[in-house]
Image (cartoon, grey):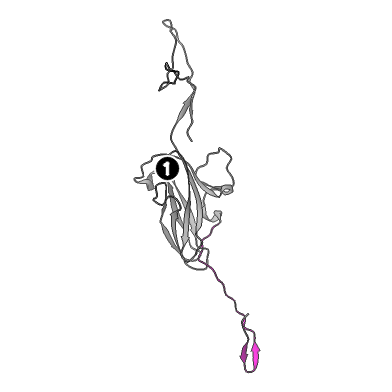
Amino acid sequence: QGGGVLMRGREFGLPCRGVCSYPQMAQNHNAIFYRKMKTRAEGQIVNKQFIVSKNTFEFGPLLVGKDKEGYKEKYPENQEDFRVTNNGLFPMHVDFSFKNDVEGKTFVVEPEYLDLEVDETRDVRVFAFTEEVGEVVDQMICSIRDNPEPFEINISCTGSVPSIVTDIEPVLDEEGEPQEGLQIEFQRLLLNRKDVRVVTIRNDSL
């Protein structure tokens, strides 16, 4: 409370209160992500989900080497919208970037910044394009002007290529090494006789 105020020989109490705050955005996962699940079992494949137990948004498996020309319209599986809400007391300017992928080789966010009034919500669109097989992990940095603590969103995707496995035994060369390509060999058959080989082909890609 503030000091007393002297008025005509009498003293009155003058309550004073102030609020100190930074501009801020809503950080709860329910306020940011449209798709979410509590947990993901080991080996379970998910597509474009925020995994609460891992605190990570996972794009899941993506085909390696897609042409980025016209990517906004071509590949819905490579993009997802995130909500950004100004739940602070002041208008908010926020810039978006990535901690590791500073050149945008894998991850892209559009637009790169937003200006939001108090309680305003808008979407940004995040894209993921992999150039190598394997998992790519990064953090999307939300840098709020006049707030010294940036907010980070964990993001991952997994580059994959189509592949198959079969139960065909490889043919070995003279040194005992498997030859390139697979062959199905039939033994000699009498005329008008039929032989059948059953081959199992399994999609081994993600």
Q: Quadrant of the N terminus?
A: bottom right
Q: Nearer the viewer, residue 18 or 170?
A: 170
User: What is the three-letter code of the residue carrying label 1?
Assistant: Thr
* Rendered view: 21 above or below 128: below
Q: What residue appears at the point 46 percent right and 60 percent down from the top-left corner? A: 143
* Rendered view: 117 above or below 12: above
| 31 part of magenta stretch | no
Secondary structure under tag 1 reads loop
Residue at the bottom extreme, as displayed? 8
* Rendered view: 133 above or below 154: above
In-image side of 50 versus 175 (left or right): right
Disc 1: CA contacts within 10 A as few (<14), some (14-19) or many (>=20): many
* Rendered view: 200 above or below 25: above
Q: How many marks?
A: 1
Q: Which residues are magenta?
A: 4-27
Q: Return the residue at label 1.
A: 130
Q: What residue appears at the point 52 percent right and 65 percent down from the top-left corner? A: 88
| 7 part of magenta stretch | yes
